[in-house]
Image: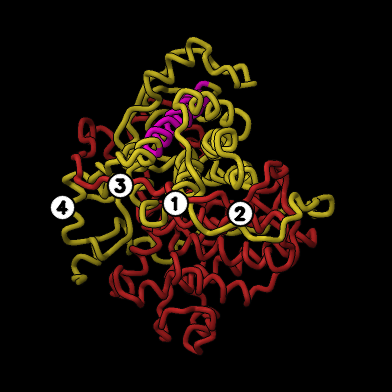
Chain colours: A red, B yellow
Amino acid sequence: MIKQADKEVSRRGFLKKTGLGLGVAVGALVLGPAFASAAEATPSSTPVAEGPFPYSKLDVTEGMVRGHAGYWKSGCSYGAFYAITSMLRDKVGGAYNQVPYRMMAWGRGGGANWGTLCGALTGACAAINMAAADADVNKLVSELLGWYSTIPFPSAEATKMGMAGAFTLTEKAYPKIDLIQTVSESPLCHASNATWIASSGIPLGDDRRKERCARLTADVVAKTVAMLNDYKDGKFVATFKVNEETESCLSCHEQDQEGKMSCTECHDPH
Amino acid sequence: MIKQADKEVSRRGFLKKTGLGLGVAVGALVLGPAFASAAEATPSSTPVAEGPFPYSKLDVTEGMVRGHAGYWKSGCSYGAFYAITSMLRDKVGGAYNQVPYRMMAWGRGGGANWGTLCGALTGACAAINMAAADADVNKLVSELLGWYSTIPFPSAEATKMGMAGAFTLTEKAYPKIDLIQTVSESPLCHASNATWIASSGIPLGDDRRKERCARLTADVVAKTVAMLNDYKDGKFVATFKVNEETESCLSCHEQDQEGKMSCTECHDPH
């Protein structure tokens, strides 16, 4: 199914990278044991059932407020996961109480600041997976990533709330200013941030850039909650399709790779 | 900190993509409610403590066997998360019993087959986050992603086990064959699979490609367990550094983006 000619051009610069590799050097940092003081949080010895947890429809605006607060506490992935899970603890309780919010904090900055999957998506996807049936998880997650790739962030609603000081649970004194919007055309943190930074001229380390991602986290929570509410009502409709250009690429290259990201973000058309 | 000239070239084809967007069409699929039959899995109303769960040193080979089995059951992300969490349930129990394995299944194929962060990494990172202190999570996760980007998959050890039929918990009749190795130079599922497929000539849908990712899942579990065992002993040393080329890029562009991925995988040098 793979033609030799396709293989030779399927990845830009494939050949020229031969032997390049990544330099690895031994660093000086040694981490000490952090386990000594840890205690078991629950004594229960009966494993949780491997099925979706009950879902109760949630409030979109409350989700945005919690997502923004969670971002400023421990990053985008924590923020999105905390927002949805904490609301489900309030409304449903039970099994949601035993899944720690902090376990998704690693997704920050696209995974320990590596810039891969946007952490707000990472946190939201884990929450979706807790509440949705196995057969539906991919549909909901794929829809969320597709939506993320196509809409301008931060939303007008999130910026309106930010400028009005409506993120009332956020402990940080966040910038209550207007922020420009950009479309990421990718679910990757790197592309999302680089696009916005290039358009805004506001650098990564600036609190205004962080506020952009705090509002984006609120937006991802809002979309996730809206999707799950529709799903609960039997009204969720998956609408995402790859764009025409990518569809054209995949007509030859579908079996050459895994993914739904826009090909021409990284590859030259041929 | 951002020069206009840098902005104009910081993303290949940035300008030409203006107005391109992703086509969205309304699909016909409506998902029904899956919640009706769900029951609360645990009646407990006391939330789990927000701190690392206790860790007990795990067996690397057992982790590989469980990771391989988990891959063939429900994908790479489930496989890695299941392998580590199930061993911790066996050795520690308690809080680990209440976190469902299935909640990380969404990471399969780089997130619902979008090709973003390799799902084996996604599942492993969530397990790391459960067991490690907040201050150390980024260091462990970043080390894992860096290691993944630089070593050949699947490992000789995993292929030796596969050929010997040593993955004894795997229910699927997996291909017990030799498989070529490739270095992904990226933590992204898309790059990892496309590189291996281009070199092997084995297409995405082939069971041999899936077996490659099953062994890769075993390898990611092995590395994660080895890191956590060292961490438990106070011997974990973070060694990853971006390669010299990327370091050179970041000397100007560090504030223009988020990420540690190799720049020239997608961007032309300038």
Residue A137 colored magenta? Answer: no
Callout 2: chain:
A
Are tags 2 and 3 found on a single chain?
A: yes
Q: Is residue A268 visible?
A: no
- Name the spot of residue A134 as percent of width and height, x first: 69, 43
Identify which amino acid the numbered label 4 is placed on.
Answer: Ser
Quadrant where the image shows the C terminus of chain B: bottom left
Identify which amino acid the numbered label 3 is placed on.
Answer: Leu
- Name the spot of residue B10 as percent of width and height, x first: 25, 60
Q: Residues within 10 Å of mark 3 (few under 14, many from 20)?
A: some
Q: Confirm or deny contact between disc 3 and disc 1 (CB under 8 A).
A: no
The residue located at (38%, 72%) in the rendering is A210
Q: Which residues are magenta?
A: B208-228
User: Tag 1's secondary structure?
Assistant: loop
Residue that label 2 marks: A99
Residue that label 4 marks: B248
Residue that label 3 marks: A31
Q: Does residue A194 lie above or below A23 as drawn?
A: below
User: Tag 3's secondary structure?
Assistant: strand
**Disc 2 versus disc 3: nearer the observer:** 3
Q: Does residue B119 lie above or below A80 as drawn?
A: above
User: Tag 2's secondary structure?
Assistant: loop
Q: Which mark is residue A37?
A: 1
Q: Which mark is residue A59?
A: none
Mark-to-mark CA distance, 2 and 3: 26 Å
Mark-to-mark CA distance, 2 and 4: 41 Å
